[in-house]
Each structure stands twice: as C-alpha cells, then as structure tokens.
Amino acid sequence: MRLLLFVLLLAVVAVALACEHKQPGCKIEGSSCVCGEGCPGHYRYATKTHCHRALAKSRNKSRDICHRRPCQNGGTCVQRSQEPGYKCICDGTGFFGDRCEKDCTLASNLEGKRFPYECVMI
C-alpha cells in the first residue's frame, strides 16, 4: 500500500513539474471553449475568439468530410486529421483502394505489387 501511495505521489509531482511555466489562454474541451491558466500546450489559443474560430473550423470540417460519402461499394468512411481528412475502410466489401473503388477479383492481376489485405477473406 505504501508503494502505491509513493508511486501516486511521484506521478503528481511529475505532472506539477512538467508544467512549471503556466500561461493564460483557452482550449477546446468537448464542444466548447474553456479559458483559464495552464501548460502552454494545453491552452493553445490566446483568446476566446481564437478558440471559437478554431472550434467552428473543426465543426465544419468534421461535419462535411464523411457526409459527402467518399467511400464506394459499401466502404466505411472514418475521419482523420491527415489529408484528405478521411480514410475508407473496405474490409469485407470485396473492394479495395483509397475509396474502395477497385474490385478484389482483379487484385490477382497486380504483378509485382502486394496483394491488398482488404481482399483477404477469412
């Protein structure tokens, strides 16, 4: 029990020391902007206005990207932070490719290339 308390105390001290230089600012928490004081990496927006702008951009981007249904043939769209902002999951559809647009029955003709894992049926 003492060891557990000691480890917990060390963790609290480590967190406190990791953020010696606190700064005022705002951060996105859930679906709203919260302003206060904390580590520079946590409070990345200087003002509540900057935070609201970033929140509005993220809402618009996240709302639109998979709503356009970029994945074909029953593929599932998953939002990502990297461009183009989504990834199509083609597993179990019988198709592969960036947008599940290529038929797995044609995958055997891919000479010199790897066989797509999406086409492996177990």
Image (cartoon, rainbow, N blue to C red):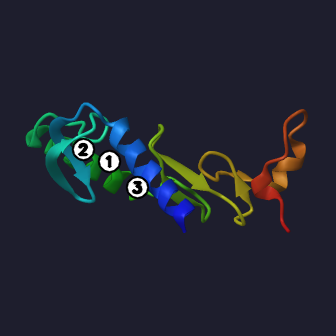
Q: Amino acid at mark 2?
A: Lys
Secondary structure of the residue carrying numbered label 3? loop
Number of disc labels: 3
Residue 68, numbered circle = 3
Q: Residues within 10 Å of mark 1 (few under 14, many from 20)?
A: some
Point 44% across, 43% down: residue: 81
Quarter where residue 45 is shown: top left
**Above or below — where is 54 with respect to 68?**
above
CB under 8 Å between discs 1 and 2: yes
Secondary structure of the residue carrying numbered label 2? helix
Residue 61, numbered circle = 1
The CA distance from mark 2 to mark 3 is 17 Å
In the rendering, at what x and y percent does residue 8 appear? 46, 57
Compared across the picture, whether 69 is left or right of 45 comes to right
In the rendering, at what x and y percent does residue 17 appear? 36, 37
Q: Which of pointers 2 and 3 indicates the residue nearer the eye?
A: 2
Q: Amino acid at mark 1?
A: Lys
Q: Amino acid at mark 3?
A: Arg
Q: Which residue is mark 2?
A: 57
Q: Nearer the viewer, residue 24 or 50?
A: 24
Point 25% across, 30% down: residue: 21
Point 70% across, 61% down: residue: 91
In the rendering, at what x and y percent does residue 31 appear? 23, 59
Q: Residues within 10 Å of mark 2 (few under 14, many from 20)?
A: few
Q: Nearer the viewer, residue 86 or 111?
A: 86
